[in-house]
Amino acid sequence: MPFMKGREPIRRTLKYLNAGKLVLKDKVRIFSVNYNTYGAHHAGARDFVFWNIPQIQFKNPEVQVLTLKNMTPSPFVRCYFDDGRDMLIDLDSRNRNDIIDHLVKVVGKTREQLDAEERLKESKDNPANFGYGCGRHCICEIPGQVPCPGTVPLPDHMRGKILFAPK
């Protein structure tokens, strides 16, 4: 499998990407991480970028994620919001777990928000649904559809056993 090549291919599996904890708030538009590829106080930021940025990109497809390397003396995250404001979060000398926990608290959605969104996504209020637990039991209840053959027999020109019967 070609996607299982490279450094730590587990990062590209669907199970790993879905396990991400950080779902950014709706008002976050750009998420940028500045760090260096050298230095002990940048180690947590490097690990965060390596392990957690793919999860953040997967969980937040509408957010632009930037990583800027070797441009700053100290690592930080900057979040740009849709109203023009931005937030600066310091990552200096933190490990990746502390970074992700802090980001979940500061710019992440709460567990209640995520649960409410999940319930809304699973709701079955679509009028096209029919069957048990829906508004309509059968498709024959929709105007313009063919009635149930158990109630009204189909005309002969619609029955396959008559149309395709050997003559």
Image (spheres, helix red, strand yellow):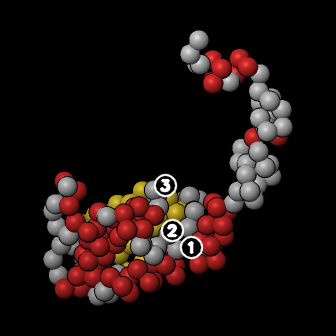
Mark 2, residue position = 24
Q: Position of residue 104 (x, y in %)?
A: 49, 78
Q: In which quadrant is the N terminus drawn?
A: bottom left
Q: Position of residue 166 (x, y in %)?
A: 56, 16
Is the residue under label 1 in contact with that under label 2 (CB below 8 Å)? yes
Is the residue under label 1 in contact with that under label 3 (CB below 8 Å)? no
Q: Marks 2 and 1, Cα distance to the nearest angstrom?
A: 6 Å
Say above or below: 11 vs 63. Answer: below
Per the image, label 1 sits on a secondary structure element best described as: loop
Earlier in the chain: of badge 3 and badge 2, it is 2
Residue 31 appears anywhere in the view: no
Per the image, label 2 sits on a secondary structure element best described as: loop
Mark 1, residue position = 109
Q: Which mark is residue 62?
A: 3
* Residue plotted at (24% across, 85% down): 41
Q: Amino acid at mark 2?
A: Leu
Q: Residue furthest front?
A: 167
Q: Position of residue 132 (x, y in %)?
A: 74, 56
Earlier in the chain: of badge 3 and badge 1, it is 3
